[in-house]
Amino acid sequence: MIKALDHIQLALPAGSEDDLRAFYCDALGMVEIPKPAPLRGRGGFWANAGELQVHFGVDLDFHPATKAHLAFAVADIDALARDLADKGYPVTWDTALPDVRRFFCNDPVGNRMEFIAAPV
């Protein structure tokens, strides 16, 4: 039986690692961690988002995830939205769920991300 989520993986096109590091590490504050030596030649990179490990893997037939997405709970959703927009990553607020403050933002290669205000 499943006990926990070990990690998530996002696909990226070859050569886009620096753009994605700028988004996920610099803008969102994830911390890059070393990939195991046997996997380093595959491209991509790994990062921690709090206790969650995120693997970014090269897909030679890359197509961005425009419906499927990750949803991150964040402490200060307004500050993050401003910061992302200031860095050139447009955000789209969504009010479909009246009790949930959230917005969507695409990463530099078009993968859809959701950001939800964490409960206070």
Image (spheres, rainbow, N blue to C red):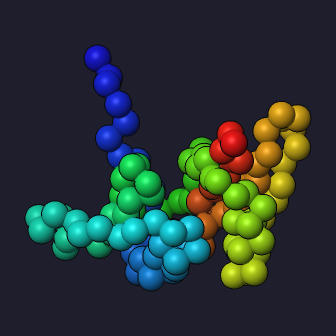
Q: Position of residue 68 (x, y in %)?
A: 60, 44
> Is 87 located above or below residue 29 in the figure?
below
- Tell whether 21 sits left or right of 65: left
Q: Residue at x 53, y 59 (%)?
A: 63
Q: Residue at x 22, y 66 (%)?
A: 35
- Asked whether 31 or 17 is in front, the reply is 31
Q: In this view, which residue lies farthest toward the left?
A: 38
Q: Quadrant of residue 36?
A: bottom left
Q: Quadrant of residue 42?
A: bottom left
- Asked whether 49 or 57 is in front, the reply is 49
- For the N terminus, the quadrant is top left
- Tell whether 94 sits left or right of 1: right
Q: Position of residue 74 (x, y in %)?
A: 63, 53
Q: Position of residue 106 (x, y in %)?
A: 66, 63
> Is 34 located above or below residue 3 in the figure?
below
Q: Is residue 55 visible?
A: yes
- Asked whether 28 or 70 is in front, the reply is 28
Q: Residue at x 83, y 34 (%)?
A: 99
Q: Is residue 9 visible?
A: no
Q: Quadrant of residue 23?
A: bottom right
Q: Position of residue 88 (x, y in %)?
A: 72, 81
